[in-house]
Image (cartoon, rainbow, N blue to C red):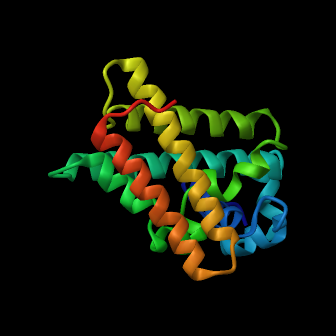
Amino acid sequence: MKVSREEAEANRERIIEAASRLFREKGLDGIGVADLMKGAGLTHGGFYGHFKSKDDLAAQAAGRALQRSNAKWVDLIEKSKGDSFALVAKGYLSEEHRDKLGSGCAFAALGADAARQGRSFRQAFTDGLNAAIGILAGIVSGRSKADKRKHALAAMSQMVGALVLSRAVDDRDLSGEILRAALDDIIGRNATGSDVR
């Protein structure tokens, strides 16, 4: 039975959405095409009608996850009535974010995998990171555009690293301590406008 162009596009979107969540939950090598398609509510046979390969889907799914994360930051910043940077950092370095692998940060969930992926996946990561840094650079303290970019890069690196470590340990107290320490440090540096060196 042939599906319409609209149905095919809707199916493609369902696959990307499911893959975005499942890759973050299970890792790029932790799930196969059949289970990705099952997660989208579709059969395995239709996969190659939408994507060249699992790698192609992974790049598109990562790109989608990063675009959504960045859009959430922009929305949060636009609605904030106070310190936008503190609000972003508090949300990112929260226990709730730590515990939501499938809807959380793709940098933290897939960063280690990205280094071993092909060009299209790494390009999606690069584009997503550049966008995130641009957003953060607009809300951090600093004396110049270059100083704000440096501060944004350091803050992003510290937030991602803290989230990765907080997810990796099997001690909930230590996990929370990692998140709080990173948050206190990041917010303190931003409040004082100190150089990140």
Image-based side of 92 in relation to 12, left or right: left
- Which of the 4 image quadrants contains residue 19? bottom right
| Place of residue 183 in the rendered image (x, y in percent of width and height, measured from the top left) | 42, 57
Q: In this orientation, does residue 61 appear?
A: yes
Please give the count of numbered marks on the rendered protein: 0
In the picture shown, does residue 42 fall above or below 122? below
In the picture shown, does residue 142 fall above or below 192? above
> Closest to the observer: 54 or 123?
123
Q: What residue is rendered at 58% in x and 33% in y? A: 127
Image quarter in which the N terminus is found: bottom right
Q: What residue is rendered at 35% in x and 48% in y? A: 188
Image-based side of 9 in relation to 113, left or right: left
Q: What residue is rendered at 43% in x and 18% in y? A: 146
- Which of the 4 image quadrants contains residue 14? bottom right
| Place of residue 80 in the rendered image (x, y in percent of width and height, measured from the top left) | 20, 52
In the picture shown, does residue 114 fall above or below 184? above
| Place of residue 35 in the rendered image (x, y in percent of width and height, measured from the top left) | 79, 73
